[in-house]
Amino acid sequence: MIRRAHVLLLAVACGAAVAAQQPPRDSTRPVAGTATIGGRVFIDGDAQRPARRVRVTLTNVAKASPGLTATTDDNGAFVFRGLPAGRFELQAFKNAYLRASYGASRPDRSGTPIVVKDGETIANLQMAIAHGGAITGVVRDGGGRPAPGLSVRVLKLGYNAVSGERTLVTPGSFNAAVTDDRGEYRAFGLPPGGYVVVVAPQVSGRGNDAIRVLTAAEVQQALRGAAVSAPASSPVARVNYAPVFYPGTTEIGAAATIPVALGEERAGIDIAMQLVPTATISGIVSSPTGALPPMLSVRLVPAGGGAEMLNGAGLRGLSALPTVDGRYAFSGVAPGSYTVRATVGTGRGAPPNTPIQWAAADVNVSGQDLDVPLVLQPGVSVAGRVVFDGAAPTPAEIVQMSFALVPPASGVAPSSGGGRVDAEGKFTFAGVTPDSYRFTTTWNAPNATERWTLKSSAANGRDAFEAPLRVSSGDPLNWTVTFTDKPTAVAGVLKEPGGRPATDYYILVFSTDRQHWTPGSRRVRMTRPATDGSYSVKGLPAGEYFLAAPADLESGEWNDPVLLDQLVRASARITLRDGETTTQDFRVGGG
């Protein structure tokens, strides 16, 4: 059933190697179709200087055809031919420059989908790529001397793509810089935004990472030329260099945010390394059966409120392989909150989707050595099935679907081999560590994601669609995921006061119930109107929603409840009913 709502009038103002001349090179991948999309890429600025050797990508929004790549010629021109009708995303990439998306309000923002019909030629599209910003500085050791060969990460404040949590992300194509012989580093190609800089010395945790602090008596002994050895009866104090965040703190919560404007270079972001008291965490991994299984590994990972940010900063902890009797040790561990986690049956080399064993313990490190024994226990089995509300796909289509479980503060799914759906719609995870998980779905059948939409998810009688999937120790999980070909949706056309398509906006649909304004909520969704002003958001749970059209949105910013609160006044209120498409056209800017 399709229900049409009246056209609304909204006034939305929201903050929230030189080469010879050659013809444009289009993609050589065969695509069945008769449409053409072409245009030019320029260097951002008033001179409209052509951007040569720019990589341009064209992606079918519905994944109904392969993605294509072209390279601009000396005039900045590109062309894609033989396209099927549909909606396409157009992007441009060049080293040291910012990603450009057609129709984006700013560099590194979401673009406007291009609608093309059979036989249609769109040949005058234009994109401008802007030079990225830079952050430079010097890293010095504890004595004030330049520290060469250290890895410096310059990270942008952003949002985890799966969980929606605030975290640190790698900006553009930049990953890490290494200090030179003068201790200098330079990070370039940075989009505008706030940045955190961290220097992370390599720590192996295998016994050679700590520096023993000499007592005053030992120093005098060494000055007399005598051999120095630590007294056997006294504890030995050890220190090491810890990861340091600008302007000079080992606590990520105290890190300074460095604002970078478009094309701006921020110099003088200097950091001094710091010595902190370190500890050794050791123990024995045991099994109730008495025999340790193969493929046993132990990891020391950050825990607590800053774990998401630390993972985003690349500080994901240490790993060790226990001895045959199960002994493990991590040395040179800086102060902080950690989880010691032992797992069996996961990782590279493990058979796919086999039962696992696990053990975990939370520890707080403050310079004193800790003994942390671990006792293995079996993982939790998950038996899942996929059902369809309405028309069902063929078995050949179903087997191209798979699920993945993403644990908190990681953003990535562990490689377990589970989650593959069979022809009967069943899938399993032979063993999962108890935790709360977000799940992701991959479905590679042609047009499958356009024809079927995720409707609900329930495990052991609990909702696992809007809430995380909870896996408890000793409680096997029966999980049902429902897809439908009649999704709850809202669609319409966004227009300017004169009736032209309004393409310079974002469409944000979010629940009127503030309890759902949480990171990763399925009741908060964003899209961009296409070149004809049309938009569509489907797969929402039925209920009351606000509909807003802000002029600019950072990727993932819709997870911020403060922003949502600011948008309420400039929003329309709509009701979505289960299985229905509500058509909501509206104008922006008044008039």
Image: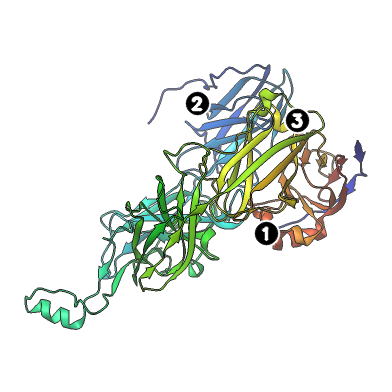
The Cα atoms of the two marked residues, 2 and 1, are separated by: 41 Å
Q: Which of pointers 3 and 1 indicates the residue nearer the eye?
A: 3
According to the picture, the residue beneath numbered tag 2 turns out to be 73
Q: Earlier in the sequence, mark 3 or mark 2?
A: 2
On residue 560, the disc is: 1
From the image, state whether disc 3 or disc 2 is nearer to you.
3
Q: Position of residue 69 (x, y in %)?
A: 54, 27
Question: Could you tell me the amino acid type at mark 3?
Answer: Arg
Three-letter residue code for mark 2: Asp
Query: Residue 557's spot in the image, x, y percent?
Result: 65, 54
**Is 570 rendered above or below residue 457?**
below
Q: Which mark sits nearer the N-terminus, 3 or 1?
A: 3
- Which residue carries the number 3 mark? 451
Can residue 555 be seen from the camera position used here?
A: no
Q: How far apart are marks 3 and 1 (CA)?
A: 31 Å
Residue 143 higher or lower than 352, as above or below: below
Q: Which of 305 and 49 is in front in this view?
A: 305
Identify the image quadrant of the N terminus.
top right
Q: Where's residue 368, x and y in %?
A: 36, 74
Within 10 Å of disc 1 (Cα), the crowding (few <14, some 14-19, many 20+) is some
Q: What element carries label 3?
A: helix
Which mark is drawn over residue 404? none
Circle 3 Cα neighbour tier, 10 Å, few/some/many (<14 / 14–19 / ≥20): some
Task: Give whichever of discs 2 and 1 has the lower sequence position.
Answer: 2
Asked which secondary structure carries label 2, the reply is loop
